Amino acid sequence: MEYKAIIFDFNGTLLWDTHLHNEAWDIFLEQHGFDLTDEEKNETIHGKQNQLIFKDLFSNNISPEEIGKYTLEKEKIYQNLCLEEKLGLGPGAFSFLDNLKEAKIPFTIATSSGIENVSFYFENYNLDRWFSIDDIVYNNGKIKSKPSPDIFEVAMEKLECSPQQAIIFEDSQSGIMAAEAAKAGKIVIVNSIDEDYSRYGHDVITHFEQFEMEVIK
């Protein structure tokens, strides 16, 4: 199979921030009287869009205005944690993105994050070195949440590649399911949280240098 393009999930993949999202959610949930186990948080939160998360937490009848309010509240907590920790991109990500750009291999990001976080990432992680914010696929309130394949299908359209020509980098359960549903030619799991992914049967990396560029060159 000849692969043509690469699609990255962002959180937990290019940016190893899962622990900060979890901490931000813990703070938010405590402030609002929720007590979720780690398993419940993985099922309800990780890899999903905020509007779906808040509907699961509060009620399907929650208003768009309330969702917007809770989203800004939680993401402000998370952004402050990122700045406090001075979190950088994942191991090898900087050089890997440089190599993709130099090799003129098409690539983009497909993330469940909303514009409030995408803008934050561009402002604080110099993403414009490799990406245009207009080419990023993010949660705009119209694309179905992972594990629906929609976000990856939109990214494939932007990159003008077929599913079989796409390599998707993911880390979350819902994201891996979405990549499989999108029929990606290759799925690479970025193990940023020291988890057992053996049940999936995909390549697993803990550093971007472990990815063999020859499969796409």
Image (spheres, helix red, strand yellow):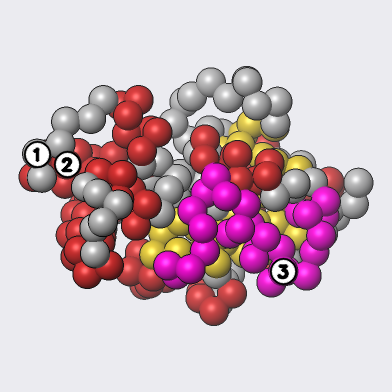
Q: Is residue 47 left or right of residue 176?
A: left
- The disc labelled 3 sits on which kind of residue? Glu
Q: Is residue 145 left or right of residue 104?
A: left
Q: CA distance from mark 1 to mark 3?
A: 42 Å
Q: Residue 205, how many percent across, how many down?
A: 62, 34
- Graded by Cα atoms within 10 Å as few (under 14), some (14 to 19) or many (20 or more), the crowding at tag 2 reads some
Q: Identify which residue is drawn at 55% across, 45% down.
A: 147
Local SS, label 2: helix
- Picture quarter containing residue 137? bottom right
Query: Which residue carries the number 1 mark?
Result: 33
Q: Amino acid at mark 2?
A: Leu
Residue type, mark 1 in image: Gly
The span from disc 2 to disc 3 (Cα, nearest Å) is 37 Å
Q: State which quarter of the image contains the C terminus.
A: bottom right
Q: Is residue 46 above or below residue 63?
A: above
Q: Which residue is mark 3?
A: 157
Position in image of residue 38 (x %, y %): 30, 26
Range of residues picked out in magenta: 140-166
Q: Is residue 175 left or right of residue 49?
A: right
For the question of whether residue 52 can be seen, the reply is yes
State the separation of the CA atoms marked 1 and 2. 6 Å
Q: What secondary structure is marked by label 1?
A: loop
Magenta span includes 122: no
Task: Write the residue at 52% across / 49% down.
Answer: 146
From the viewer's side, name the closer residue of 212 and 198.
Answer: 198
At horizontal 24% and vertical 49% (from top left) the residue drawn is 59
